Image (cartoon, rainbow, N blue to C red):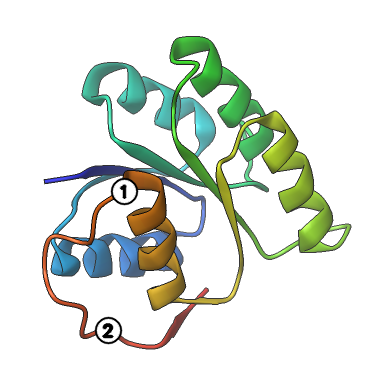
Amino acid sequence: MPRILLVDDDDIFRGIIHRMLIRVGYEVEDACNGRQGLEIFRRWRPDVVLTDLIMPEMEGFETIMGLRKIDSKVKVIAMSGGGRIDASDYLGLAGKLGAVKTLEKPFEFKELVSALTEVLGEPPPKGLELPPSVG
């Protein structure tokens, strides 16, 4: 079963994505910020990390760099709805720092599963009967 680490400071968003990923068949751990995400990554070693970019305490950019110091081959999917600048600018920078895929919030859950499928190189563990949009 593929292991996904979900890092996002929005409790509601994180909870929804967590439950939906489990429903599809992934094993999921989550963190409310990058610092906690790095701690979980060190002990749990997920197959993919999904991280928001704009978070308190440790932003997603720092998280991506920290993950790559631990494991240079880590597979990261960055997510952002923007902030002071357009989301595409944040996501472009995340790609330069090592994110293998990016998703602009809000996105269709099917887009997330498609990104995971591509990054993991395998389909989700279960069928895909999902709500259309999150974020």
Query: Is residue 129 found left or right of 116 in the rendered image?
Result: left
User: Circle 1 sits on which residue?
Assistant: 121
Measured as percent of width and height from the top left, residue 39 is found at 37, 21
Q: Of residues 43 and 94, which is closer to you in this image? A: 94
Residue at the image position 34 percent from the left and 25 percent from the top: 41
Label 1 sits on a secondary structure element that is loop
Residue drawn at x 50%, y 38% is: 33
Q: Mark 2 falls on what kind of element?
A: loop
Left or right of 127 in this view: 73: right
Q: Amino acid at mark 2?
A: Leu
Q: Position of residue 127 (x, y in %)?
A: 14, 76
What is the residue that sits farthest to the front in this orientation? 121
Seen at 33% across and 57% down, the residue is 117
Q: CA distance from mark 1 to mark 2?
A: 20 Å
- Residue kind at label 1, given as amino acid type: Gly
Q: Position of residue 58 (x, y in %)?
A: 61, 31
Q: Which mark is residue 130?
A: 2
Count neighbours of disc 2 (C-alpha within 10 A) and say few if under 14, some if 14 to 19, many if 20 or more: some
Vertical placement of residue 62 versus 60, above or below: above
Residue 74 to residue 100: above or below:
above
